[in-house]
Image (cartoon, rainbow, N blue to C red):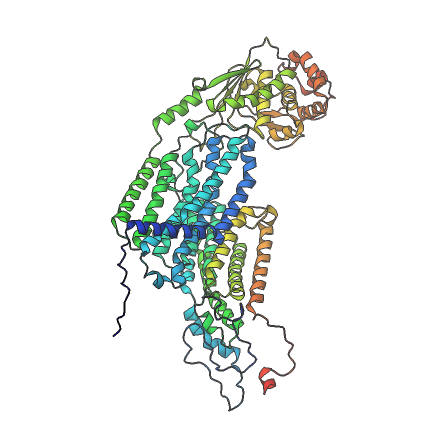
Amino acid sequence: MRGLNGPRPGADRAPANGAPVNGAPVNGATAPRTAPRPARGPGRASSPPSVFASVRALAPPVLRALPWRPLAATGLLGPLLAAVPRLSDDPPTPWLAVNLLRGAILLYALGLAFLLDDPARHTTAAVPTGRVLRTGLRLALALPVTVLWWTATLLAMPAEHRPPAGAITLEAAAVCALAAAGAVSALRLGQEAAPGRQVAVGVLLLAVLGPWFLPERWALFVTPDDPLWTAAHDRWAGLLAASVLTAAVWLREPGARLRIRCGTSGPSRTS
Amino acid sequence: MTATLLPQAPAAERTGPARTFSAVLALALLEGRRLLLSPPVLAALAAFTAWTVWRTPGVEDGHPALQDVDRATQGGPLLVALAVMLSVNHAVLRSKYRDTERHFSVLALGPGARTAAHALSLLPVALVTAVGVLAHFGYAALLPDAVGHGSPAELAVGPLTVLLFGAFGVLLARVVRSVAAAPIALVLLFLLFVAGALPVGDDERGTRWLLPIVSEPGPVIFPSDLLGRPAAWHALYLAGLTLVLGTLAVVRAGARGPLALGGLAVAVALAVTGGVLQTGTLPADVRAARERATLTPEKVQSCVRHTGTTYCAYPEWIPRTDRWAQVVDRIREASGVTASDPALVVRQRIDARFGPAADTDPEATGTPHQVTVGTSWGGNRVPEFAADVAGVLVAGDETKAGRICDGRAVTVMWLALSALPDPVGSLRDVRLDDSDTGSALVLSQTAPHSMTEAQTEVVRDLLDRPRAQVATRVKAHWTELTAPGITAAEAAGLLGAPKPQGDDKCED
């Protein structure tokens, strides 16, 4: 079915230089009843709703439409995995402790890969609410959940076996950002309504092949007692920055250019 | 009045089991091709090939024992297996996500038969994996110094893992109808089976055999008949488990016919048989054979003679005696040992009593003129063996060679190293700290001994001189050089090297 009636690849939104037909944004589920409806006079273009109003209107339906099940499943498995050392009498090796946490991170990142799956994508492609706002809101709504999951996972691992918390948190942030960047890119570059599986497979491939094929000077998957630990975490920080940057770039509308504001805003110019 | 002739309606065709079977086969072929060409499987096959090509040339330093190489082929296919699990899972769920389930439901081929076709579609990729495994094993088997025997059951484990994980992917798609399930299951399986988070014990038999791939952590190569791995039962267990998962998926999809249920019963029987028999205790005859081969190796070994030296080895290693003879002959020709002296015996010994997982070296023997050689060859094993041979030639037996703590070490090390292609490199290899100056411990199969700073200095100087020139002096002063109590400075004087400056105090 893909590509039958869509606009050009990746274009989720019609060019928004005309007046919006309806100020109420739609996303996935039904339009909210409390949508702000700006007053408009006959023959005058209405002013678009403020970002704050859009967010307030969008948040409940987006919250409902988010694919919570993969996120919940992987989020619950994280603390369980991290708690494995509590079951055994023998202390885990540092290698096992750090890799259990990495397994938990990878699992959650797989859940995140499905975050932008939206069966209604082709329906909502025409709404005037921009991609930055719609996709950004999904990511922002997942953020508190992610923080909660990571806190629980880190606390589930016994303190005496826990790898340095700051460094391992950096790894978690980098992998989560990588998964999110993958999802954003898949949305921007393809027409698939649910690209989550491809993103998940990509993240998995990187995770499985990385430790096998990364040469030592680019090593990422090291244990805390390894002298390369600090250098590896510089690379993790680089990966985090690159992922965030990629996500930010692909989040923008295709074809959007940087515009220099010249005193007046859009609507007043059109009138 | 016009009469309309209606063509007679075609009689309803009955679709018998034969028609269903050919339809399943056709679908399996199509799905098999799609599975082989799916991006995860292609990526995994590429990585598997790259890994194998990169790793294989260095297999066991180029001197492989095939009973270990067959096990080394089991890890790579795991990557393919995980990718196949992802892809086949998606293939089964494709009709749900493309919303074609309702079109399929009007076809004669029911969901059970379609699931069976998906399970059968695993065979082509398993065949491709088998080709890769055979290429890996075949390369090692064709190396000029390959010894031992491979086991077909061990070689089958790689392709069987692909089938097992694939069948799990099919079953998962029938149980959890979500594409998110397979990646999550994959990570959990990986953590459980590969990263070793599953506590399975480390007994030689027992529950660790329930994992798909059972490796032996020990570094010692065993003769095939002492390995005692229930490889055939394990292959049966894997095949049975694969069939259990596959038929469970078919039954779950709705096929409750006698074929599906009967197949499930047979599969369970196979898996339980294999599973129980492989985890049973180690047979007493394997234990007895290990004791015999460790304590009285002469009862199981055969011996050959090369130029005045006898080489006794476990039967699988007889072809390797030529390699040992090359080293021994070079050392003998530079030493003062004459043909009238008692013949040197090189005997292969391992300590097999504690199983392949243990890392126990055999103890030094006090038998005169006997040198121990292990089951590995190549790399560091060559200079270690050379040092052992030279030690026995100088000191008389291995126990005495291990206690050498005087200037005789100069003769021993010069004899051993000058017989090798890269003497100074070998000197670093054979010393514990990889150094070529100062004092250090010299590694050995049975009798490690130490080298003082002064001895190292003299040996380094002698290695820079022409071999024939030093050999003449060694032969001329053999009795003095092999007399206990000689100092490094005296040895240097006899051999024409400058007096060493360094410390000559033995560490033990």
Tell me if residue A114 can be seen: yes
Rendered image quadrant of residue A15: bottom right
Residue B476 x/y as whole percent: 69, 12
Tell me if residue B485 can be seen: no
Left or right placement of residue A160 versus residue B406 in this view: left
Residue drawn where x is 51% and y is 91% of the image: A42
In this view, the residue in front, B355 or A38, is: A38
Above or below — where is A246 with respect to B304? below
Residue B131 x/y as whole percent: 47, 40
Residue A97 x/y as whole percent: 47, 49
Left or right placement of residue B168 versus residue A50 in this view: left
Residue drawn where x is 56% and y is 66% of the image: A250
In this view, the residue in front, A109 or B30, is: B30
Q: Quadrant of the N terminus of chain B?
A: bottom left
Residue A126 x/y as whole percent: 49, 75
In this view, the residue in front, B147 or B200, is: B147
Left or right placement of residue B399 versus residue A149 in this view: right
Q: Quadrant of the C terminus of chain B?
A: top right
Outermost residue toward the front in this view: B1
Rendered image quadrant of residue B497: top right
Above or below — where is A70 with respect to B75? below
